[in-house]
Image: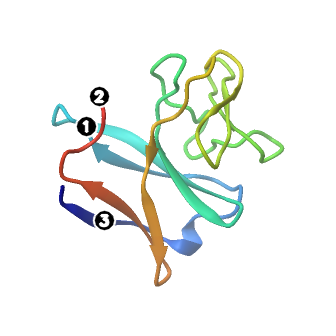
Amino acid sequence: MARRQRLIAASDQIAERGKGLRFSVESPSGGSWPAFAIRYGGAVFAYVNRCAHISVELDWAEGNFFDTSGLYLVCATHGAAYFPDSGRCAAGPCKGGGLQPLPTVEHGGHVYLIEQEDGLDE
């Protein structure tokens, strides 16, 4: 399986527990899905921007994914809460589901998405 790195942001564009950076990824069907990257605990995490409860985007305003405490990612539609470092459901209607993680790497002052030739799960 071939892997390549795609630049998604300069490291300083993603602040600790701050506004997330939106981007898109290819879906297996050939279209694209909205995605986002956030920084939590000093590390960058990226996910498909799709709630596990109902397939809607999480952010209530572009890039606003964290709750007011900065401890959880929250779906603005129904309040599902997710752990920022794993995407696992923390509370609410996601009931054990989770966000679909996207592999990233950070080096040289930039954040890269690691893309795989076989794409994402549908």
SS label for mark 2: loop
Query: In the image as oriented, which residue stretches furthest toward the bottom?
Result: 108
Q: Indicate the position of residue 14 as horizontal and vertical percent values.
A: 58, 64
Quadrant of the drawing holding the N terminus: bottom left
**Crowd tier of the residue under label 1, counting other residues whose Cα lies within 10 Å: few below 14, some 14–19, many 20 or above:** some
Q: Picture quarter containing residue 15?
A: bottom right
**Type of the residue with mark 2:** Glu
Q: Tell me what residue is drawn at x 52 percent, y 26 percent.
A: 51
Q: Tell me what residue is drawn at x 55 percent, y 43 percent.
A: 62
Q: Tell me what residue is drawn at x 61 percent, y 33 percent.
A: 60
**Type of the residue with mark 1:** Ser
Residue that carries the numbered disc 2 in the rendered image: 122
Q: Indicate the position of residue 99 as horizontal and vertical percent values.
A: 52, 34
| Above or below, comparing residue 2 to residue 26 in the picture | below
Residue that carries the numbered disc 1 in the rendered image: 27
Asked if residue 71 lies left or right of residue 30, the reply is right
Residue that carries the numbered disc 3 in the rendered image: 6
Q: Tag 1 or tag 2, which sits nearer the N-term? A: 1
| Above or below, comparing residue 28 to residue 11 in the picture | above
| Distance of label 2 from label 3 (alpha carbons) | 21 Å
**Type of the residue with mark 3:** Arg
Asked if residue 107 lies left or right of residue 76, the reply is left
Quadrant of the drawing holding the C terminus: top left
SS label for mark 1: loop
**Crowd tier of the residue under label 3, counting other residues whose Cα lies within 10 Å: few below 14, some 14–19, many 20 or above:** few
Q: Indicate the position of residue 80 as horizontal and vertical percent values.
A: 66, 24
Q: Are marks 2 and 1 in contact (CB under 8 Å)?
A: yes
User: Of 84 and 58, which appears nearest the observer?
Assistant: 84
Q: Tag 3 or tag 1, which sits nearer the N-term? A: 3
